[in-house]
Image: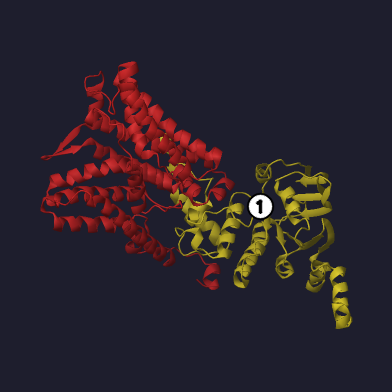
Chain colours: A yellow, B red
């Protein structure tokens, strides 16, 4: 797939205040086609504020948010979605008892026929679901099986495939591996990398697992207390380096120093 | 399922499942088995049950439960209850009768007013549910008790009696009776038109559920309302619409009853709402919503119809009917849960 070097999304010095509280400041971020940008950070570091701004849940207070080089201020997720910016949250917006193909098209059903006789084009929906899932290398035994019977990773992948099928150019993945085991996480990560590489989707991958991030990421941003602690491309980083920043950077090394060098009796006192 | 099977990138055709498994996976599988069992049971126990005329009586009995039960099943799939459905039937008959005898003098106008009234009860139930965010059990328990009181109080106030006047002499009676309460001859047996409407409604409801956008939404709204909302399903409208559908089904049955008996007993209908719910549950509807079928509700109603008539044909005390309904409900729920668990596991 041909890559264009012009960024799809660009954030310049973006910040957000809740009253007097400065939740986010000075974030620069660029999402290009086929690139995976990982956003890491501890709880309360500002990750959710950042993705909420990108996904259009609320607008930023400072800086600039450019989509296709045009400044935007979103007031609803629908506006972001119309520009191809889709978020897949941990809840996934799937209905467990509903078959896979019905979930895939829920709210965007394909219909044929006229007036009161308009009915679902089940053939088309079934085929589209099958094609989309197989393109991503996911083989389900039966599309009629309820989504609730799928594994956690498969469910995640169905939600991502759905977002891509309905025109996402930028995918915001909110901790897709947080609740998954090792094997299931692998499935999702493989899929994320594939979506970016083969389909040229720009991915924003939110996680607090540096191992997962380093497997798929092209660019890394570590947030800490609302500020950017690290902003580096893959070439300038090692996993250890990333983990060091992720784990609290200098703060943690001070703690390590304290714990290992101080005499035990003194620390208790 | 292994990881390897998840990620094989080959294009492969999905294996169609065996018919046996496909049938077992349907929500109404348990009810079908139950219906066959009950049928065989009364066939053996009650010789008069074996006649064709007995079968049509059973079907008629089933249709008077089944017409509201179809709508109640859809509502339950949409995740809500309606306890007011039983008295809403009576309220709607009363409305038609009173509007005609007290105000307009024409049954067509009265029937139309009753339709608006029944839809309004449904809309009110739905609106209250959305506004108060209470469980539908509570909301409709409230409207149930209110309607029950109103039915009797207003009837006494207007007629000085607990029943309404005979409407058979009013203009419009003959045409409406033909539409709602006539009989069709099939061979040597008379079949009530209510049975035809019932089967028609079941077919229509099945088509809507499985083959239309709205049907997809009904399952989603009951299965996981939040997810449905997130992908753009109009959850509130679907729920209010379902309550109004129950209102419509109550009106339809009330018209049949009104033009069959010509008068209305204002205290009637209490307890029937539980039969509608029981028929839906026996037919495979989950109490928690998101799962069930219209055909299942029909099978549930058919089982109850067979039991009502079977007890009579077997010459037992009719009070046994209630016992059977209760036992059936428990048994069906256990069997349905077991079948569903198996079907979900076996892929």
Q: Chain of mark 1?
A: A
Residue holding disc 1: A87
Which residue shows up at 34% across the image and 45% down it? Answer: B276
Residue B270, above or below A163: above
Q: Secondary structure at mark 1?
A: strand
Q: Taking A26 as reference, is B163 left or right?
A: left
Q: Nearer the viewer, residue A69 or B266?
A: B266
Q: Nearer the viewer, residue B305 or A114?
A: B305
- Percent x, y of residue B67: 31, 40
Residue A250, above or below A200: below
- Quarter occupied by the N terminus of chain A: bottom right
Which residue shows up at 78% across the image and 58% down it? Answer: A45
Which residue shows up at 43% across the image and 48% down it? Answer: B77
- Percent x, y of residue A185: 63, 68
Q: Taking B126 as reference, is B317 left or right?
A: left
Residue B299 seen in render: yes
């Amino acid at each position: 797939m041909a890559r264009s070097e012009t960024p799809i999304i660009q954030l310049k010095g973006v910040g957000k205040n809740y009253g007097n509280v400065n939740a986010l400041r000075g974030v620069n971020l660029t999402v290009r086609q086929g690139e995976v940008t990982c956003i890491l950070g501890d709880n309360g570091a500002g990750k959710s504020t950042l993705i909420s701004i990108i996904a259009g849940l609320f607008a930023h207070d400072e800086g600039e948010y450019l989509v296709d080089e045009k400044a935007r201020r979103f007031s609803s997720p629908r506006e972001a979605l119309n520009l191809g910016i889709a978020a897949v949250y941990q809840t996934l917006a799937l209905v467990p008892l509903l078959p896979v193909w019905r979930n895939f098209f829920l709210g965007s059903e394909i219909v044929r026929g006229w007036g009161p006789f308009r009915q679902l084009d089940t053939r088309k929906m079934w085929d589209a679901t099958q094609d989309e899932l197989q393109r991503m290398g996911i083989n389900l035994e039966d599309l009629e099986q309820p989504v609730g019977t799928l594994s956690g990773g498969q469910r995640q992948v169905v939600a991502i495939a759905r977002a891509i099928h309905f025109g996402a150019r930028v995918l915001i993945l909110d901790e897709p591996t947080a609740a998954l085991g090792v094997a299931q996480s692998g499935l999702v990560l493989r899929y994320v990398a594939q979506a970016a590489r083969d389909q040229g989707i720009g991915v924003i991958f939110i996680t607090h697992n540096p191992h997962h991030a380093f497997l798929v990421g092209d660019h890394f941003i570590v947030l800490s207390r609302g500020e950017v602690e690290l902003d580096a491309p893959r070439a300038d980083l090692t996993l250890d380096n990333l983990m060091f920043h992720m784990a609290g950077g200098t703060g943690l090394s001070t703690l390590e120093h304290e714990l290992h060098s101080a005499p035990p009796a003194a620390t208790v006192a | 399922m292994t990881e390897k099977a998840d990620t094989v990138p080959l294009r492969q055709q999905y294996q169609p499942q065996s018919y046996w498994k496909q049938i077992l996976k349907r929500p109404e599988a348990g009810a079908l088995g139950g219906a066959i069992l009950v049928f065989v049971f009364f066939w053996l126990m009650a010789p008069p049950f074996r006649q064709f005329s007995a079968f049509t009586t059973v079907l008629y009995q089933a249709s008077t439960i089944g017409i509201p039960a179809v709508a109640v099943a859809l509502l339950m799939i949409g995740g809500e209850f309606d306890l007011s459905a039983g008295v809403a039937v009576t309220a709607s008959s009363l409305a038609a009768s009173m509007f005609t005898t007290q105000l307009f003098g024409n049954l067509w106008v009265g029937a139309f007013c009753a339709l608006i009234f029944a839809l309004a009860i449904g809309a009110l139930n739905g609106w209250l549910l959305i506004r108060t965010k209470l469980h539908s059990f509570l909301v409709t328990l409230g409207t149930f008790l209110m309607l029950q009181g109103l039915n009797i109080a207003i009837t006494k106030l207007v007629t000085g009696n607990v029943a309404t006047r005979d409407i058979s002499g009013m203009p419009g009676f003959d045409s409406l009776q033909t539409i709602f309460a006539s009989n069709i001859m099939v061979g040597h047996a008379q079949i009530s038109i209510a049975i035809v409407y019932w089967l028609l409604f079941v077919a229509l409801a099945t088509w809507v559920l499985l083959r239309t956008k709205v049907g997809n939404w009904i399952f989603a709204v009951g299965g996981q309302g939040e997810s449905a909302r997130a992908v753009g399903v109009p959850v509130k409208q679907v729920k209010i619409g379902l309550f109004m559908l129950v209102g419509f089904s109550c009106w339809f049955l009330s018209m049949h009853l009104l033009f069959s008996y010509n008068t209305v007993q204002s205290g009637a209908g209490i307890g029937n709402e539980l039969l509608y719910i029981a028929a839906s549950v026996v037919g495979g509807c989950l109490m928690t919503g998101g799962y069930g079928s219209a055909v299942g509700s029909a099978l549930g109603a058919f089982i109850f119809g067979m039991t009502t008539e079977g007890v009579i044909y077997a010459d037992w005390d009719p009070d046994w009917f209630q016992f059977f309904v209760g036992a059936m409900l428990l048994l069906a729920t256990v069997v349905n849960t077991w079948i569903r668990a198996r079907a979900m596991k076996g892929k």
